[in-house]
Image (spheres, rainbow, N blue to C red):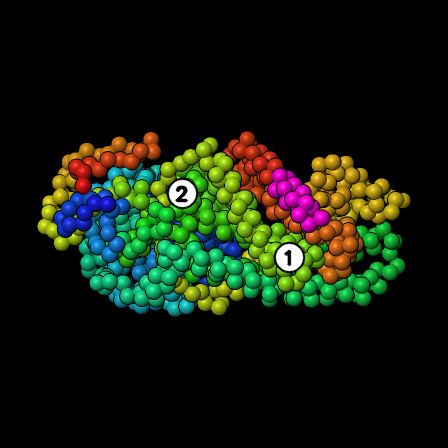
């Protein structure tokens, strides 16, 4: 999106504190057709979507959730910069109705900047349930801006809100840009003087919040002794469930794709030159098909993660783990981000922006890439199904999750001296919420789609490169020691043989540096088997379970993908630190695999 | 652990579970003060401790409509007075009126409370 086209159309920004349902409303308004966009003058990407407001093609930008326009965290600075540089036709402020007592300050701040504001009072259903009564008309009168009650989750009040937004855009007062936001903002005392009478007039707070469900659940979930076991048991059951449901789906889909390839596509290409059919079928189709077969598992995974995240359990996890994290030089947020990293490391790395101390950010960025992301999960699901008994599969996967935690703890313990910080940790513990089915499915679908679009580029590049290396120079038998990949694999044997990795696996690992999605597609190409079951057989004839586990350990621990390296570079703004993350993960991966492989060979000869 | 008598000034880290207290003062740099006040922790507000995490982990607090977690060492920057004592108002006015602003928190040692020891 070029700066010029941004300036021409009405531009609306979505502002709000964290945990106000901003993203839910964004999805409601835009129908999930959001894309990540670059903004002139800003170093980071923001979620944005095009939509029609009052008949005009407009742009809606979702700003990061912030508490205070005066703050100093990356996110807060980013929002200030955005407001300073971008002329806005409307700022939609989403408030969490049940926390109205302290959320109004954002409205007052935006108003004092002279921005055109419209307030959406979200989670009105929850506020009513907790015993709050808010007279939104009185509030609107007092604030001097329209206030509309909505529930983004259940979809109530959305038409009225939409009509009000359209009305404001149609009125066309022209875009507003605020110059020097820091100067116009009120201090605490002045803010309180404006807010207190407003609250007194328009809001009736109950004596005590009537949220007994949250109190009862917290008594168990945050219990000093039971809390952590309950948390890990929940995670274990969740992964068991994903595994039990997802793996049969994956193997059926894999076989189906393989059958389509042999029965349908191969006859179609029968007249083509063998090199070309080989390239299309054994290279592209097999590589992509093998990864595509895992999409159901990834969908289930994102579904489960989405529920855990939306329910409010993640901030409880931060509470439970903070005692340990503090001793490791990290904090509860680092732990939560590492959990989010189980989906994908990239957004988890970006999430460190909420931290103010750069040392804490760096240490978190050193730790997060060890989270077992969904791309690595693909490889592990496949390898454990191929080389371990079905009854052991889930345990193998769970052990890798534990190894992932162990690597993080070790890394933090080793490096905390170099990156020490004492940033205070203040984190909200929102009431428990259960996402609606629509929310859950929508979200998991978006994540899977994103995973697929994102990974497809890498997979196509990777499998094409691997297939070429496997079949060139012409004239030697494919995948033999005489091919480019065979020579490369052989050359690295002195380094990788001690950890049980053969030349074929070496090629897959090398390309896995670009992205872990390539590893599996690459193996399918190297062993010329698209059907996961047959690929599994082919693998199990060449390597034993010790080699397989060593391979998985190495895959888990070394650099996740080029994208994480790029994000670490852009977020830390340091090449030295970026190099450290790459080198350290390679060293740790090699040592861990060596210890495991040599140890296992001694114990189980 | 400080004794919890009504009217006694103590640090939030020592407030007993379930007993509300009124915030007298918060020490820290301006960025921290802003973040705390955005979440409802500022002078004059009533705060209560819902629970303490294991292994001297964070405190689970409630301020107004918001529940949040705060580390014990950060809670030590916050002076409170147990509710139900008339001295609360006078005390908080005095601190607002003219006691010196504590220096920004740099060295890692905790700020000493500005109104005498508990």
The answer to whether marks 1 and 2 mark residues whose Cβ atoms lie closer than 8 Å is: no
Check if residue B50 falls in the magenta segment.
no
Q: Residue drawn 48% across and 39% down?
A: A413
Q: Is residue A109 visible?
A: no
Tell me the tag on residue A310.
none
Q: Which chain carries label 2?
A: A
Dot 1 crowding, Cα within 10 Å, few <14, some 14–19, many 20+? many
Q: Where is residue A328 in the image (x, y as percent from the top left)?
A: 44, 41
Q: In which quarter of the image is the N terminus of chain B?
A: top left
Check if residue A602 falls in the magenta segment.
yes
Pointer 1 residue? A381
Q: Where is residue A458 in the image (x, y as percent from the top left)?
A: 66, 48
Label total for image? 2
Q: In this rendering, is residue A57 above or below B76?
A: below
Q: Nearer the viewer, residue A197 or A561?
A: A561
Q: Position of residue A230 (x, y in %)?
A: 44, 59
Which segment is the magenta one? A589-605
Q: Can residue A368 be seen in this view?
A: yes
Q: Which chain carries label 1?
A: A
Q: What SS does tag 2 mark? A: helix
Q: Position of residue A51 (x, y in %)?
A: 49, 58
Pointer 2 residue? A326
Q: In which quarter of the image is the C terminus of chain B?
A: top left
The quarter of the picture where residue A86 lies is top left
Dot 2 crowding, Cα within 10 Å, few <14, some 14–19, many 20+? some
């Amino acid at each position: 999106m070029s700066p010029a086209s941004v300036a021409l159309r009405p531009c609306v920004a979505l502002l709000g504190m964290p945990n106000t349902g901003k993203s839910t409303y964004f999805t409601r308004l835009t129908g999930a057709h959001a894309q990540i966009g670059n903004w002139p003058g800003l170093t980071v990407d923001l979620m944005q979507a095009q939509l029609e407001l009052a008949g005009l093609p407009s742009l809606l930008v979702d700003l990061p959730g912030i508490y205070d326009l005066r703050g100093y965290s990356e996110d807060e600075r980013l929002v200030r910069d955005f407001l300073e540089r971008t002329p806005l036709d409307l700022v939609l402020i989403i408030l969490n109705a049940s926390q109205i007592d302290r959320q109004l300050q954002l409205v007052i701040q935006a108003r004092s900047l002279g921005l055109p504001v419209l307030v959406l009072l979200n989670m009105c259903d929850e506020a009513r349930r907790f015993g709050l009564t808010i007279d939104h008309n009185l509030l609107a009168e007092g604030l001097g801006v329209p206030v509309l009650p909505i529930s983004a989750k259940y979809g109530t009040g959305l038409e009225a809100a939409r009509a009000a937004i359209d009305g404001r855009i149609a009125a066309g007062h022209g875009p507003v840009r605020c110059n020097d936001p820091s100067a116009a903002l009120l201090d605490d005392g002045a803010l309180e003087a404006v807010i207190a009478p407003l609250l007194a007039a328009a809001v009736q707070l109950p004596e005590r919040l009537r949220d007994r469900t949250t109190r009862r659940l917290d008594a168990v979930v945050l219990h000093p002794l039971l809390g952590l076991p309950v948390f890990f048991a929940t995670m274990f059951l969740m992964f068991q469930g994903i595994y039990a449901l997802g793996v049969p789906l994956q193997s059926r889909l894999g076989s189906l794709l393989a059958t389509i390839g042999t029965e349908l596509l191969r006859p179609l290409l029968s007249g083509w030159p063998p090199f070309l059919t080989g390239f299309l079928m054994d290279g592209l189709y097999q590589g992509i098909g093998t990864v595509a077969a895992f999409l159901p598992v990834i969908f289930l995974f994102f579904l489960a993660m989405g529920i855990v995240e939306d329910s409010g359990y993640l901030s409880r996890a931060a509470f439970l783990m903070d005692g340990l994290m503090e001793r490791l030089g990290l904090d509860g947020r680092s732990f939560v981000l590492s959990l989010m990293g189980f989906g994908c490391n990239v957004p988890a790395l970006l999430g460190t922006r909420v931290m103010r101390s750069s040392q804490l950010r760096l240490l978190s960025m050193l730790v997060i890439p060890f989270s077992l992301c969904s791309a690595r999960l693909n490889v592990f699901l496949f390898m454990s199904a191929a080389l371990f008994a079905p009854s052991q599969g889930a345990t193998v996967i769970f052990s890798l999750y534990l190894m992932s935690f162990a690597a993080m703890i070790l890394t933090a313990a080793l490096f905390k001296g170099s990156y020490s910080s004492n940033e205070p940790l203040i984190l909200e513990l929102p009431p428990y919420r259960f996402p609606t089915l629509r929310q859950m499915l929508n979200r998991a679908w978006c994540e899977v789609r994103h995973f697929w679009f994102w990974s497809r580029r890498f997979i196509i590049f990777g499998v094409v490169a691997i297939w070429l290396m496997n079949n060139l120079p012409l004239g030697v038998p494919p995948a033999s020691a005489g091919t480019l990949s065979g020579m490369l694999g052989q050359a690295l044997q002195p380094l990788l043989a001690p950890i049980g990795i053969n030349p074929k696996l070496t090629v897959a690992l090398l390309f896995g540096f670009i992205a872990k999605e390539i590893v599996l597609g690459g193996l399918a190409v190297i062993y010329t088997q698209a059907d996961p079951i047959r690929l599994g057989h082919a693998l199990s004839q060449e390597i034993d379970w010790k080699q397989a586990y060593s391979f998985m350990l190495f895959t888990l621990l070394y650099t996740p993908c080029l994208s994480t390296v790029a994000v670490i570079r852009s977020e830390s703004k340091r090449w030295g630190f970026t190099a450290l993350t790459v080198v350290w993960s390679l060293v740790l991966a090699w040592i861990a695999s060596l210890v495991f492989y040599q140890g296992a060979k001694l114990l189980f000869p | 652990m400080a004794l919890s008598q009504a009217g006694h000034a103590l640090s939030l880290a020592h407030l007993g579970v379930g007993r509300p207290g009124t915030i007298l003062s918060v020490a820290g740099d301006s960025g921290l003060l802003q973040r705390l006040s955005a979440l409802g922790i500022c002078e004059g507000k009533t705060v209560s401790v819902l629970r303490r995490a294991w292994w001297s982990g964070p405190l689970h607090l409630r301020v107004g409509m918001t529940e949040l977690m705060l580390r014990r060492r950060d809670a030590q920057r916050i002076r409170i007075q147990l509710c139900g004592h008339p001295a609360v108002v006078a005390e908080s006015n005095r601190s607002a009126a003219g006691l010196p602003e504590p220096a920004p928190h740099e060295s890692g040692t905790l700020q000493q409370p500005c109104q005498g020891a508990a």
